[in-house]
Image (spheres, helix red, strand yellow):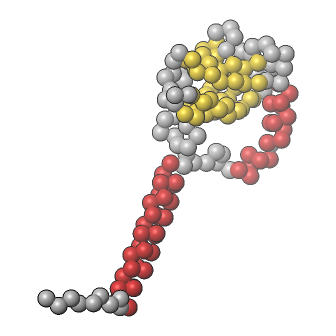
Protein backbone atom coordinates (compact mmCIF):
# COMPACT_ATOMS: atom_id res chain seq x y z
CA UNK A 1 0.00 0.00 0.00
CA UNK A 2 1.15 3.39 -0.91
CA UNK A 3 1.11 6.13 1.72
CA UNK A 4 -0.45 9.37 0.67
CA UNK A 5 1.08 12.58 1.88
CA UNK A 6 -1.34 14.93 3.69
CA UNK A 7 -1.53 18.39 2.22
CA UNK A 8 -3.00 21.33 4.05
CA UNK A 9 -5.26 23.05 1.59
CA UNK A 10 -7.15 26.28 1.77
CA UNK A 11 -10.34 24.37 2.64
CA UNK A 12 -8.59 22.69 5.58
CA UNK A 13 -7.32 26.06 6.87
CA UNK A 14 -10.81 27.55 6.47
CA UNK A 15 -12.33 24.66 8.45
CA UNK A 16 -9.74 25.02 11.25
CA UNK A 17 -10.22 28.79 11.56
CA UNK A 18 -14.01 28.50 11.28
CA UNK A 19 -14.07 25.81 13.98
CA UNK A 20 -11.87 27.88 16.30
CA UNK A 21 -14.08 30.95 15.90
CA UNK A 22 -17.22 28.84 16.40
CA UNK A 23 -15.83 27.58 19.73
CA UNK A 24 -14.91 31.13 20.83
CA UNK A 25 -18.30 32.54 19.85
CA UNK A 26 -20.12 29.61 21.49
CA UNK A 27 -18.27 30.10 24.79
CA UNK A 28 -18.96 33.86 24.71
CA UNK A 29 -22.67 33.29 24.13
CA UNK A 30 -22.81 30.73 26.98
CA UNK A 31 -21.05 33.12 29.38
CA UNK A 32 -23.22 36.08 28.37
CA UNK A 33 -26.39 34.00 28.84
CA UNK A 34 -25.20 32.83 32.27
CA UNK A 35 -24.38 36.41 33.34
CA UNK A 36 -27.78 37.77 32.28
CA UNK A 37 -29.67 34.81 33.78
CA UNK A 38 -28.08 35.18 37.24
CA UNK A 39 -28.19 39.00 37.45
CA UNK A 40 -30.75 39.94 40.13
CA UNK A 41 -31.87 43.05 38.27
CA UNK A 42 -32.16 46.71 38.99
CA UNK A 43 -31.72 48.19 42.44
CA UNK A 44 -34.14 51.05 41.77
CA UNK A 45 -36.68 51.72 39.03
CA UNK A 46 -35.34 55.15 38.15
CA UNK A 47 -31.77 55.86 39.25
CA UNK A 48 -31.98 59.56 38.40
CA UNK A 49 -34.99 60.12 40.66
CA UNK A 50 -33.39 58.06 43.46
CA UNK A 51 -30.18 60.08 43.20
CA UNK A 52 -32.02 63.37 43.81
CA UNK A 53 -32.72 62.55 47.45
CA UNK A 54 -29.74 60.28 48.16
CA UNK A 55 -27.63 62.79 50.13
CA UNK A 56 -30.58 63.85 52.30
CA UNK A 57 -31.47 60.24 53.10
CA UNK A 58 -27.79 59.46 53.82
CA UNK A 59 -27.49 62.35 56.29
CA UNK A 60 -30.69 61.31 58.08
CA UNK A 61 -29.49 57.72 58.30
CA UNK A 62 -26.03 58.69 59.56
CA UNK A 63 -27.55 60.97 62.22
CA UNK A 64 -28.99 57.85 63.88
CA UNK A 65 -25.45 56.60 64.60
CA UNK A 66 -26.51 52.99 64.11
CA UNK A 67 -24.02 50.17 63.54
CA UNK A 68 -25.20 46.81 62.20
CA UNK A 69 -23.48 43.44 62.52
CA UNK A 70 -24.63 40.01 61.34
CA UNK A 71 -23.60 36.62 62.73
CA UNK A 72 -24.76 33.05 62.29
CA UNK A 73 -24.61 30.56 65.17
CA UNK A 74 -26.38 27.28 65.79
CA UNK A 75 -28.97 27.63 63.03
CA UNK A 76 -29.72 31.25 63.94
CA UNK A 77 -29.00 34.45 62.06
CA UNK A 78 -28.36 37.27 64.52
CA UNK A 79 -28.66 40.88 63.35
CA UNK A 80 -27.32 43.30 65.98
CA UNK A 81 -28.16 46.99 65.68
CA UNK A 82 -26.44 49.31 68.15
CA UNK A 83 -26.56 53.07 68.62
CA UNK A 84 -23.61 55.46 68.91
CA UNK A 85 -23.19 54.48 72.59
CA UNK A 86 -23.12 50.75 71.76
CA UNK A 87 -26.58 50.09 73.23
CA UNK A 88 -29.02 47.73 71.44
CA UNK A 89 -31.58 49.38 69.19
CA UNK A 90 -35.12 48.16 68.65
CA UNK A 91 -36.40 49.52 65.39
CA UNK A 92 -40.00 50.53 64.81
CA UNK A 93 -40.05 48.31 61.72
CA UNK A 94 -37.49 45.87 60.29
CA UNK A 95 -37.63 44.12 56.93
CA UNK A 96 -34.74 42.06 55.63
CA UNK A 97 -33.91 39.88 52.66
CA UNK A 98 -31.24 37.23 53.11
CA UNK A 99 -29.54 35.98 49.97
CA UNK A 100 -26.42 35.52 47.92
CA UNK A 101 -24.66 38.46 46.30
CA UNK A 102 -24.53 36.77 42.89
CA UNK A 103 -28.11 35.57 42.32
CA UNK A 104 -31.61 35.69 43.75
CA UNK A 105 -32.53 31.99 43.72
CA UNK A 106 -31.53 31.57 47.41
CA UNK A 107 -33.25 34.79 48.56
CA UNK A 108 -35.53 34.47 51.56
CA UNK A 109 -37.23 36.76 54.04
CA UNK A 110 -36.32 35.67 57.57
CA UNK A 111 -38.75 36.33 60.39
CA UNK A 112 -36.53 38.42 62.68
CA UNK A 113 -37.72 38.94 66.26
CA UNK A 114 -36.14 41.26 68.81
CA UNK A 115 -34.85 39.45 71.92
CA UNK A 116 -33.90 42.55 73.88
CA UNK A 117 -30.38 42.67 72.45
CA UNK A 118 -30.53 41.63 68.79
CA UNK A 119 -32.85 40.55 66.03
CA UNK A 120 -32.83 36.76 65.70
CA UNK A 121 -34.20 34.47 62.98
CA UNK A 122 -33.98 30.71 62.57
CA UNK A 123 -32.17 30.03 59.29
CA UNK A 124 -29.83 27.25 58.19
CA UNK A 125 -27.27 28.63 55.74
CA UNK A 126 -24.83 26.89 53.43
CA UNK A 127 -21.19 27.97 53.63
CA UNK A 128 -20.10 31.05 51.70
CA UNK A 129 -20.91 34.73 51.44
CA UNK A 130 -24.43 35.95 52.16
CA UNK A 131 -25.97 39.43 52.13
CA UNK A 132 -28.68 40.80 54.35
CA UNK A 133 -30.39 43.71 52.63
CA UNK A 134 -32.20 45.39 55.48
CA UNK A 135 -34.60 48.27 55.77
CA UNK A 136 -35.62 49.58 59.17
CA UNK A 137 -37.36 52.60 60.59
CA UNK A 138 -36.24 54.29 63.76
CA UNK A 139 -38.95 55.07 66.29
CA UNK A 140 -38.97 58.66 64.96
CA UNK A 141 -39.65 57.32 61.43
CA UNK A 142 -36.13 57.81 60.01
CA UNK A 143 -35.41 55.23 57.32
CA UNK A 144 -32.25 53.13 57.71
CA UNK A 145 -31.15 50.91 54.80
CA UNK A 146 -28.01 48.85 54.64
CA UNK A 147 -26.50 45.76 53.05
CA UNK A 148 -24.77 43.65 55.70
CA UNK A 149 -22.30 40.96 54.63
CA UNK A 150 -22.45 37.63 56.44
CA UNK A 151 -19.75 35.00 55.84
CA UNK A 152 -20.47 31.39 56.78
CA UNK A 153 -17.41 29.16 57.25
CA UNK A 154 -17.36 25.47 56.27
Give residue 78's quadrant in the image. top right
| Position of residue 103 measured from the top left corner of the image (x, y, whole percent) | 52, 43
Q: Is residue 113 left or right of residue 36?
A: right
Q: Is residue 144 above or below residue 54?
A: above
- Give me the residue at 39% from left, 85% from top: 13
Q: Residue at x 51, y 18 (%)?
A: 75
- Decide which of 128, 137 is in the foreground and name it: 128
Which residue: 23% across, 90% down?
4
Q: Residue lying farthest top?
A: 116
Residue 154 in the image: state x and y as whole percent.
52, 28
The residue most toward the left is 1
> Quarter holding the N terminus?
bottom left
Q: Quadrant of residue 134?
A: top right
Query: Taking 53 as reference, is 23 above or below it?
Result: below
Task: Name the image quarter holding residue 129.
Answer: top right
Residue 89 in the image, given as x and y percentages of width and height: 74, 16
Q: Is residue 137 left or right of residue 95?
A: right
Residue at the (77%, 47%) spot, across then down = 51
Residue 98 placement (x, y as % from top left): 57, 30
Q: Can the viewer see residue 91?
A: no
Check the image and report above or below for 20 versus 120.
below
Q: Can residue 129 be seen by looking at this rendering?
A: yes
Amino acid sequence: MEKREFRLTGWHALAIFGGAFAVIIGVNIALAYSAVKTFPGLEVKNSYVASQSFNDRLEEQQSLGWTVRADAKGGLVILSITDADGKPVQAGRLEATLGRATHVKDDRTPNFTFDGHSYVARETLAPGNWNIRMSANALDGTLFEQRVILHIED
